[in-house]
Image: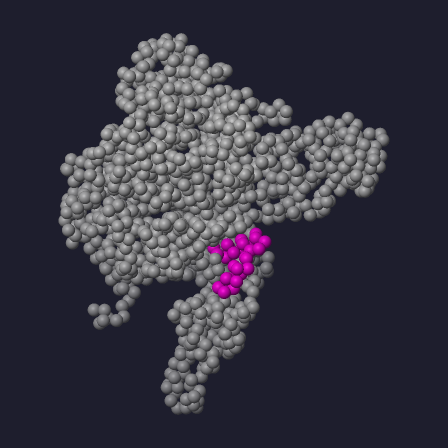
Amino acid sequence: MAPPPLLAIGSSFYPFSPPPTTIAIRVPSFPLSHTPSAVKLGIFLSLHSHIPLFNGPPVSFALEYDGPPLPFDLPRAVPISVDDIPVASVVSQVPLSDTLSLPVVQPIVAPKNPTVKFSKELRTLGSEARVSKEVELGSERTVSPTSVIAFEDRVSQSNNVCELSGELSSSGAFEFSNVNYASGEFSDEGGSSRMLEESRGAGSSGTVEFCESFDKSGRSSSALRVSNELHQHDWASTESVLSLEYPSTRVSSLKAEDCGDARRPPVVTFDVDSDDALDGDFGDEEEAVTRPLKREPLTKGKKGSCYRCFKGNRFTEKEVCLVCDAKYCSNCVLRAMGSMPEGRKCVACIGFPIDESKRGNLGKCSRMLKRLLNELEVRQIMKAEKFCEVNQLPPEYIFVNGKPLAYEELVTLQNCPNPPKKLKPGNYWYDKVSGLWGKEGQKPSRIISPHLNVGGPIQPDASNGNTQVFINGREITKVELRMLQLAGVQCAGNPHFWVNEDGSYQEEGQKNTRGYIWGKAGTKLVCAFLSLPVPSKSSNSHGEQHSSLSSKAVPDYLDHAIIQKLLLVGCSGSGTSTIFKQAKILYNSVPFSDDERENIKLTIQSNVYAYLGVLLEGRERFEDECLGHLKKWQSSTPGNTGPGPESDEKTMYSIGTRLKVFSDWLLKTMVSGKLDAIFPAATREYAPLIEELWNDAAIKATYARRSELEMLPSVANYFLERAVKILRTDYEPSDLDILYAEGVTSSNGLACVEFSFPQSSPEETGETADLHDSLIRYQLIRVHARGLGENCKWLEMFEDVGMVIFCVSLSDYDQFTVDGNGCSTNKMVLSRKFFEAIVTHPTFEHMDFLLILNKVDQFEEKIEQVPLTKCDWFSDFHPTISRPRPNSNSNSINHNPSLGQLGSHYIAVKFKRLYSSLTGRKLYVSVVKGLEPGSVDAALKYAKEILKWSEERPNFSSSEYSMYSMEASSFSH
Amino acid sequence: MSLSQPKMSVAELKERHLAATDTLNNLKQRLNHTRRSLLDTDLAGYARSQGKSPVTFGPTDLVCCRTLQGHTGKVYSLDWTSERNRIVSASQDGRLIVWNALTRQKIHAIKLPCAWVMTTAFSPTGQSVACGGLDSVCSIFNLNSATDKDGNLPVSRMLSGHKGYISSCQYVPDEDTHLITGSGDQTCVLWDITTGLKTSVFGGEFQSGHTADVLSISINGSNSRIFASGSCDATARLWDTRVASRAVRTFHGHEGDVNSVKFFPDGNRFGTGSDDGTCRLFDIRTGHQLQVYCQKHSDNDIPPVTSIAFSISGRLLFAGYTNGDCYVWDTLLAKVVLNLGSLQDSHEGRISCLGLAADGSALCTGSWDTNLKIWAFGGHRRMV
């Protein structure tokens, strides 16, 4: 027995730190380490503050701490008692009814200079000049945080009404919150308490700390805390600037020289003026496109200087923010732009769309950045810049024939074989028949791929022509008319033409082609002269367009955008691997790489050796049995001495010595489990032997009795019959071989394949829907349940999958496995257990489940011989089937469902009932023959439909979504 | 008896098996009972009787001072380097990112062959990182090796041999060549990285090992031959790497999966965090449970503990919970002194992992909200 516990506790006491005695004033113990944390922090900062990569606003006391790490007089966490705060008493005299009129309403007026107005109001509200002195509106617009403290104090004294004080606080922090009003973040916020939070997140740390302490409604000590918290700026403010939602304010600097004054905490500068500009910039007149707020740089120094350090001139090398056009010198760029998760943007601009005029610069790295960062970082930043979603061309900025594009339309446009070059936001017209493309009100600029389903119908005045000659319903311009005339097209009488993409034209209402506009050699010259577009070569080969459209690789950034994950699970032997392989073969143009094929080949060959081993083992057994029988028979008939002793040794299962040696060797290596190790070499050596072995009569006889060999899996037949071919060294596994092969995908616990369903024929469904479908990529993740433990800890990793496909082998109903305790369990019951575990797992609470009842072909054969009731779970299966009478014709069979069909329906209902009793939802079921591509394809397409369906489900009543008629009611119970 | 009856029926065997299991459970219960009766006090009680007062925290003593953004999937694991302030994090977006914790810069972004990564670790020298996940392979990346043409860092070594997912890995301190992994196949394995072979396997079918998935391991900092493992079987076990055949000791007490184990800085105790919502402190010399850290919730719904870490002194225990809370426990008095989840800038999702910088100056938490946050002293303190 263990020693008494008291002893243990006593000894366990030692390691704890001795009570802290030598440390800070307020904090009795140090949070993270033995050394006092202030010291630690001092070291931490002084070591690293000079690192140029330190981004965000500069750390004020990092600058101070240049000297030894422990300057005792330095920290300004001077306890400020309430009495020391100059304004407190003054403001608290303000009658409550007056302060009530103070809040929120005023800022919405959005004055030109809200700060001024606020301070004015404050003055009118009876506060003395000292307040406005504190709220200095000098050129720097600095405000001393003590004023905030003053307000805080007032609030804490007069916090009668919670709501009121909340509002007070938001007005009290006016310097900060009006910034928010200017940026429009605030106007729609209702409750004052909400505002508190907003201003907390607003990035102005002064407000942050203020609100924090206000929440705690500390009394006298709160002032101290506030002043303390203000010292904390460097940590907190770097953080809050990073918070993307409210990037409009910025703590520009904590001025080091001000820190000399012991009474005043560091001054915080807020840049308010530039934010006023934010309101004005709605809409771009030139392009008549409504745009969200355009961001302006926050600070402006003298012309040409760095926007952050205000140093340098026009000629110093600078990096430009893609959003707000702020320019930073090489010293500041990393601080101002941080880790650049979306490319070269100020930290405050992250999340905003880029300035369209800078689109051309996307992904083009400057020399400066290359100098500052290492190659990998630069590459990642440029990649992020080019492909991150927010930097993509916003489709709604592009109008085609007066209609803003949708996301899919833009993708179509950009991925067509002949896309418009350098697409910028604006209004365009597009002639779908001929592929002519131009800016609204202008002559055509390009001929792009025709028949794209983008934008609205073309308007007659799209190109603002006045010639009264029409092409495809568009009045053409004079330049075009001249070109037509030079090309020899009859244009008298203001004709209306139909022009196809190949340049053939017909007059409206007539059938015969009158000629080809770009047919003549001269026309192209004329077009070049008149700067009109000519069809490019690739657009002439329009026959291939449809196929190339579908096969074209989806752009990189879309890869991540739309991906639906399907999780494929099932007990071992349920055929998940077959379905996985089937999906690979079905949807991937190159299902298996050469390396994979080589591995698969080895796997198949070693499998076949294993099967042969089982066969040889069986042969020995049969031989022994035979000999035994023979002996018995001989002993029972003593008079019969006919066959000599030498013939005793020979039975129909005996083999020659050479084969015997081989057989012994194979069995020996199998027993020792070294088959994999010696195996590839073995093929070369024994390949010729295999043929001899396979053709041996004894083996053939054993093979005939293969049903008695339990170790031999059912697929072995398929491979053994091809053994000779497979075990040649030049064997190339076919897709079918791979499908049948065991152990190809289960080498590790998990395998996944990405695919998209091939586009169905265009006439089947609408084009846009089709296009959308082909854009969605699916990822089929197959998990080998056995290798991943029974506790389903790993399931949490798959909470983002769209659907779980659970695979059950129908033919398992008469199979049993023996577990570690020696109890044998029905495989179907095991499957059910696993199904229950997964379905009830909290991760999959709202997940759709598709049950695949696999191996229905084997099941149909088996159920004729083995009754379904062999499995306890199915004991109530009593099909009321009228067996087709021998004389009935084949038609009647079609009417009567076969026993197999009934059985699979019955099992499906069993699972559905189980599922709905566990979750209260409906289970989708698909009956599949894993080895038939069409069957698997149908099941996966069904999965796709369910996914689409679940997206649209809110629009339908819940009672309708059952596609299969396997209703529970169809079986009597 | 069995000799006289060489052939027993299956039913008889089953009966005997059942009886044996019953006896075993009875013995276990008696053992636990005796243990409990001997355990007349716990750590907190003793500390209180000695007049210890709990640690208190000022508002600036632990604040979020960095947010590391860059992952696009749930963060599952993180690890600090032993000397320089770098962090490696593993996420469901299929990437490992090596960060500079001070500047927030990403030093490396490693695309993994298998996106379902569960654990990652820095080597003691900081030259390489290891990771493992559902692919059942522990992959080692040498951070100094050249990238291939796509800019990806190649795998420098694959440690394959586990039959289940890799849930946890840690380098043996001061050795870049040895690594211990814990796996869903109920075993832990000590690997030799240079050869890529198993040095020893702890647990498994015929040994007195865990009877369910191993979820976490922790190597004793003061004696690197000793390590602890926590498992789905609700136990923690102590192992000696020289004796692979059996666990040195088994620690019962938890009522749910043990998600996290971490050695106490002095190496004589270790802490555990479990699905039952408690953290516990065990003494490895006596085998006793010293303290349970459990916060009473109003609605009886105690969120599971996902990850734990001790401060350098051991006085503080950080524990991440599935509901996004991260408690700072006073180890001595078993009181929650701070909840990082209630501070500003806290995580929005489950805290999945946490770790302390080697010098103890900062705590890093990783969350399912795809971010990592660094917490440190955020104030300015006057010295006396």
Closer to the camera in the image, A697 or A180:
A180
Give the left or right position of residue B220, taking residue A617 as reference.
Answer: left
The overriding secondary structure of the stretch rendered in magenta is helix
Q: Position of residue B58 (x, y in %)?
A: 28, 30
The image shows residue A108, relative to residue A335, as above or below, that is above
**Camera sees residue A521:** yes
The range drawn in magenta is A576-604
Q: Position of residue A643 (x, y in %)?
A: 44, 89
Q: How is the image coloured?
A: one colour
Tag count: 0
The image shows residue A791, relative to residue B292, as above or below, that is below
For image coordinates 70% across by 45% down, the residue present is A538
For image coordinates 45% across by 58% down, the residue present is A747
| Quarter the N terminus of chain A occupies | bottom left
The image shows residue A83, relative to residue B183, as above or below, that is above
Q: Quadrant of residue B85?
A: top left
**Camera sees residue A830:** no
Q: Quadrant of residue A573?
A: bottom left
Closer to the camera in the image, B93 or A576:
B93
For image coordinates 50% across by 54% down, the residue present is A580
The image shows residue A796, relative to residue A830, as above or below, that is above
Q: Position of residue A499 (x, y in %)?
A: 77, 37
For image coordinates 29% across by 38% down, the residue present is A32
Q: Position of residue A207 (x, y in %)?
A: 38, 23
Q: Is residue A230 magenta?
A: no
Give the left or right position of residue A578, taking residue A845 as reference.
Answer: right
